[in-house]
C-alpha cells in the first residue's frame, strides 16, 4: 500500500524498550510507526541498515541547497504580498541607516559602519516581522472570540424569538379555546 503521493505507508515497529507485554487479546500491537525519512534503530541506539526497496524514495535529509531550489523567480516579485514584509523591510531600512550612520559618526570606518548597518537592517527587520506576526495572531484570536460571542448572542436571540413565538402560539390557542366556550353556563 502507498499514500496518495506514492510514498509507502509507515511500518509498525513494536513496543518501546521496557514496555510491558500486551494483553492476551491483542495479537499484534502497533505502538510505533516508521515515517518517511526515518531510520529504524537497533537496541543499542545505533542506526541499523534498513532494507531498501526499489520503489522506496531516497531517505537523505534535505539541505539548504535543496531549500534554495524550491524558490522560484516570481517569488521575488510577490514579496510585497507577504503579510508584514513591508513593515519589516521599512523598519529594517530605518534601523540599518540609523545604526550605520551612528557608527560612522562616532568614528568607525566605512566598512565597519556598513557591517553594523547590515546587522541593524537584519535585526530591525526580524524584530518588526515577529512583532507584526504576533500582532496578527493576537488580532486573529480576538476576531475569533468576537465571532464566537456574536454567534452566541445570535443563538440566544433566536432562542428568545422562538420562545416568544411559542408563547404567542400558546396564547392564541388559549384565546381560541376561550372563544369556543359558550358565554353562558348551565349548572
Image (cartoon, rainbow, N blue to C red):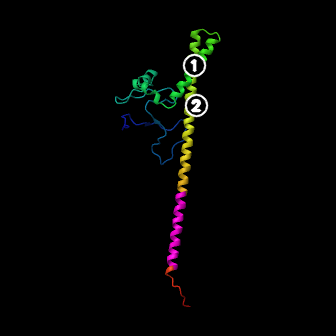
Q: What residue sits right under mark 1 in the picture?
A: 96
Q: What residue sits right under mark 2 in the picture?
A: 131
Compared with residue 36, is residue 25 higher up or lower down, i.e. above or below?
below
Q: Is residue 121 left or right of residue 6?
A: right
The secondary structure that dominates the magenta segment is: helix
Compared with residue 10, is residue 180 higher up or lower down, i.e. above or below?
below
Compared with residue 44, is residue 160 higher up or lower down, i.e. above or below?
below
From the viewer's side, name the closer residue of 178 and 45: 178
Q: Position of residue 138 (x, y in %)?
A: 57, 38
In the rendered image, is residue 115 in sight? yes
Furthest toward the right, the residue is 106
Tell me if residue 169 is in the magenta stretch.
Answer: yes
Which quarter of the rendering shows the N terminus?
top left
From the viewer's side, name the closer residue of 63 and 16: 63
Crowd band around label 1 with a 10 angstrom C-alpha radius: few (<14), some (14–19), many (20+): many
C-alpha span from label 2 to label 1: 18 Å
Q: Residue at x 59, y 11 (%)?
A: 112
Secondary structure found at label 2? helix
Q: Which residues are magenta?
A: 157-178
Q: Position of residue 103 (x, y in %)?
A: 62, 14
Amino acid at each position: 500500500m502507498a499514500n496518495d503521493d506514492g510514498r509507502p505507508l509507515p511500518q509498525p515497529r513494536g513496543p518501546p524498550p521496557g514496555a510491558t507485554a500486551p494483553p492476551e487479546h491483542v495479537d499484534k500491537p502497533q505502538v510505533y510507526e516508521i515515517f518517511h525519512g526515518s531510520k529504524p534503530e537497533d537496541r543499542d541506539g545505533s542506526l541499523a541498515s534498513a532494507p531498501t526497496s526499489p520503489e522506496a524514495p531516497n531517505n537523505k535529509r534535505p539541505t539548504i541547497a535543496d531549500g534554495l531550489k524550491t524558490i522560484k523567480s516570481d517569488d521575488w516579485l510577490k514579496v510585497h504580498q507577504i503579510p508584514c514584509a513591508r513593515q519589516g523591510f521599512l523598519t529594517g531600512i530605518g534601523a540599518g541607516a540609523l545604526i550605520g550612520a551612528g557608527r560612522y559618526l562616532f568614528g568607525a570606518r566605512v566598512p565597519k559602519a556598513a557591517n553594523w548597518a547590515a546587522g541593524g537592517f537584519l535585526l530591525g527587520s526580524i524584530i518588526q516581522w515577529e512583532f507584526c506576526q504576533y500582532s496578527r495572531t493576537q488580532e486573529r484570536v480576538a476576531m475569533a472570540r468576537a465571532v464566537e460571542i456574536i454567534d452566541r448572542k445570535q443563538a440566544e436571540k433566536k432562542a428568545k424569538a422562538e420562545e416568544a413565538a411559542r408563547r404567542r402560539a400558546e396564547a392564541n390557542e388559549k384565546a381560541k379555546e376561550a372563544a369556543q366556550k359558550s358565554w353562558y353556563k348551565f349548572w
